[in-house]
Image: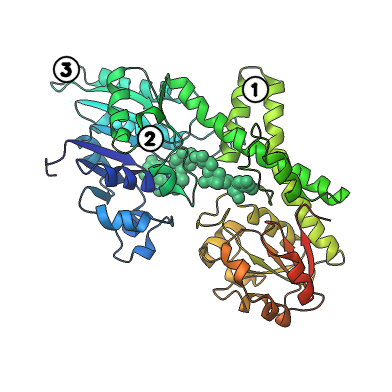
Amino acid sequence: MLNKFEKKICCIGAGYVGGPTMSVIASNCPELRVDVVDINKERIDAWNSDDYSKLPVFEPGLENIVKKCRDINLFFSNKVEECISQADIIFISVNTPTKTNGLGAGFASDLKWIESSARQIAKYARNHTVVVEKSTLPVKTAETIKTILNSSLDINPSSEEKKTFSIVSNPEFLAEGTAINDLQNPDRVLIGGEDDYSINLISDIYKKWIDPEKIITTNLWSSELSKLVSNAFLAQRISSINSISALCEATGANIMEVVGAIGTDTRIGKKFLMPGPGFGGSCFKKDILNLVYLCRYYGLNEVADYWEQVVKINYWQQKRISALVIKNLFGTLSNKKLTIYGFAFKANTNDTRESPSINISKYLLQEGSKLNFYDPKVNQKQIFNELDVNEEDGNVLVYEDPYKAVEGADAVLILTEWNEFKFFNWEAIYKVMRKPSWIFDSRISLDQNHLKKIGFKVWTLGAK
Ligand code: UDX
Ligand code: UDX
């Protein structure tokens, strides 16, 4: 590796967080060399693809940054060990899914990837290395990482080369779909640490493009906990407004009017009050369950129950939407064809992790429905994987043309708020559907009056 760079950063994990975050750092800090490494070869090949539409993460603005920096000061590779050994700063950005079995199953995060990353760092790092937790982690994970790193010092105490480590927590607050803007203009950057040198080293990176007043420094544990609490508060707003959407449907109040009325109270605020089929994405559910686990661990059962309810309401909203689709289609879906517009967990991303479309589709399939899908950014392979079906199954078809996907369908469900749906030729769609033709708009994104005039029967979330 050339030595023309002031410092070298290695990021372990080239996912939705690692990829965009490192791209923005590389773009703002040409004096730094940034290596993003991943054990997944296919993913790295995609990051290195000449065809930029094949980058593994779709984010508005990402393509241009990768074009500008790749192979200049931003490198994607599988050379995990080599890049660790050359790095001054190592970001850990690997996935931490909820444990599926063993102690804490269903709640606690599985830290096996964090542990294996820490072991690799312990083995291959040289000199002084600042290790940054970027992945969202249970509080006190830094302790685990520290123990693993320090144990490597005991194994080889006589080594001539003295290895030292410090740990910093620097949680990521980017939202998918707006990741580049969030990284470029964050509300704040949070850096938790134990020594000034490391905190300043990481702060100095962000200061290259972010107002120093937005950089908050705390102790390690406050930083780790703030990330969980931040996501729990955001998700809580969604569950709160979704619970009220059901009450609006029952009473004749209109959820968007309620949102407008309460959101103008500056204490409540307008943002993050959009009702929908429930929150998805890789973080909210996992982080709340983590918080619940932590509270129970410390004997705070009432606090745990309080936060767990946010997740329960989220499931309930998905179940309730599925149930009312079935009810409106005369109580049965057998021999009916439904078209689902939108499979991503929200618009402007190709990510489908924890998407409400998954549970809703599964409920509808269980009722005997055939499902046709269209999503502008999600392909057949991903939809089949998430629903655990294959081509032979025959009940699930994925289309690249939204108009083909509705031929002969009894209903269209809007499950992701892709802007293009607003501009579809709904008259043409109505013509090719079976009658009566239903639209279930769980994202409140279409003009119901217009649709009703065309002849559709329309259900819109939060309205009678
Ligand atoms: C992940 C976590 O889910 C989130 O909590 C955290 O805040 C950031 O990291 P994300 O980037 O969206 O989020 O995950 P993902 O897209 O799955 O990327 C993780 C990458 O790490 C994968 O590409 C995986 O191959 C890689 N990885 C995992 C390694 O390179 N080494 C490992 O040991 C484990
Ligand atoms: C979230 C946090 O916003 C981010 O700070 C954190 O780092 C990771 O988790 P993300 O999951 O990418 O980001 O997307 P976000 O925009 O927060 O949306 C999460 C889910 O909530 C989506 O399914 C979205 O459709 C839903 N949502 C969001 C609503 O239903 N209503 C809203 O008003 C906002």
Quarter of image, res 410: bottom right
Closer to the chain start, of discs 1 and 2, is 2
Q: Amino acid at mark 2?
A: Ser
Q: Residue at x 84, y 64 (%)?
A: 328
Q: Amino acid at mark 1?
A: Arg
Q: Which residue is mark 1?
A: 296
Q: Is mark 1 within 8 Å of ligand 1?
A: no
Q: Is residue 103 visible?
A: no
Q: Which residue is mark 2?
A: 116
Residue 79 locus on image (x, y percent): 25, 46
Q: Mark 3 highlights which residue?
A: 158
Could you give the CA–CA distance between mark 1 and mark 2, rounded to whole angstroms?
27 Å
Q: Is residue 208 shown left or right of residue 222?
A: left
Indicate if the residue with disc 2 has its beta carbon within 8 Å of ligand 1: yes
| Secondary element type, mark 2 | helix
**Any atom of ligand 1 within 8 Å of the CB at mark 3?**
no
Q: Is residue 368 left or right of residue 217?
A: right
Quadrant hosting residue 61: bottom left
Give x and y (percent) for residue 372: 65, 70
Q: Position of residue 205 (x, y in %)?
A: 29, 34
In depth, the one of 169 and 242 nearer the eye is 242
Determine the quadrant in which ligand 2 lies: top right
The nearer-to-camera label among 3 and 1 is 1
What secondary structure is found at the residue carrying circle 3?
loop
Q: Is residue 360 visible?
A: yes
Report, in whole angstroms, how far the alpha carbon at label 3 lies from the one at label 1: 43 Å
Mark 1 surroundings within 10 Å by alpha-carbon count, few (fewer than 14), some (14 through 19), many (20 or more): some
Q: Return the residue nearer the eye: 264 or 384.
A: 264
